[in-house]
Image (cartoon, rainbow, N blue to C red):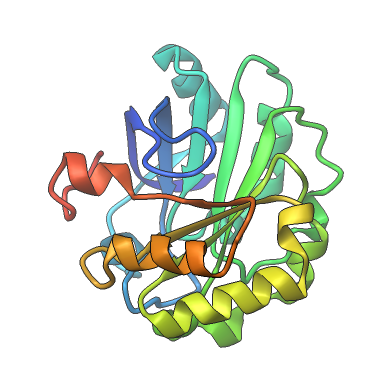
Amino acid sequence: MYRVVEKFISINGEGKLSGQLALFIRFAECNLNCRYCDTQWANKSDVKYEIMTKEEIYNYIKQTKVKNVTLTGGEPLIQKDIYELLEYLSKDNDISIEIETNGSISLKRFQDIKINQLRFTMDYKLPYSNMENEMLLENFEYLKEKDVVKFVAGSMEDLEKAKLIIEQFDLTKKTNVYISGVYENIDAKDIVEFIKENNMNDVTFQLQLHKFIWDPNQKGV
């Protein structure tokens, strides 16, 4: 049984499939409390949700006829029986599953799930988030070429730390590396100039598209 607070069709606002049609399933609650979190409402213990079984989630996905499915939150990997849900979804090779995770939950136990189109988009929380101490560095061992590690910078200090982590763990050789900014907190031009000045090859700058298309606080987009 899964606690779903929101499900909707939109476009991917960031990551490898940015701009592509996607179905989002948002689960309740998170184990972190990031300073800039834009879904705080979903993390509250008293948030309203609907209970869905794995069969109901799968049937809903198929009814939409949308191929790209993003499981998000909250934090999807803290959901009870999330492993069983992923195993169940793995029976269908016509859907592509992306899991947005905050970097504090081990990815090790998910390595043996045989889904050809399963990928992780994992955050590394930088100092501005106030959650950097919660990051599980061993997760860098489990990221593959199809996955993404995402850095959301709120300051120049964050950019320096992102550069250090990328170099320390040789991330561009292991997976896809994206950098974006905390909305309205750091100038996009400053991030791009930082990437240029530091010759950060194979690092992708991104904007959160949905925040420019709709009101940044709007749900269901």
45 on left or right of 105: left
- Locate residue 67, reporting x and y percent: 52, 19
Quadrant for the N terminus, please: top right
> Residue 33 occupies which quadrant of the picture?
bottom left
Of 87 and 133, the residue lying toward us: 133
Of 134 and 54, the residue lying toward us: 134
Q: Residue at image x 60%, y 26%?
A: 96
Say above or below: 21 vs 46.
above
Extreme-right residue of the structure: 112
Q: Is residue 38 visible?
A: no
86 on left or right of 170: left
Q: Is residue 110 visible?
A: yes
- Locate residue 199, reporting x and y percent: 59, 63
- Locate residue 49, reporting x and y percent: 33, 49
Q: Residue at image x 57%, y 26%?
A: 55
Q: How many marks?
A: 0
Quadrant for the C terminus, please: top left
Q: Residue at image x 82%, y 33%?
A: 114
- Locate residue 75, reporting x and y percent: 50, 60
Say above or below: 148 vs 23.
below
Say above or below: 32 vs 216.
below
Q: Residue at image x 54%, y 38%?
A: 16
105 on left or right of 57: right
Extreme-left residue of the structure: 215
Of 47 and 15, the residue lying toward us: 15
> Residue 194 occupies which quadrant of the picture?
bottom left
Of 200 and 113, the residue lying toward us: 200
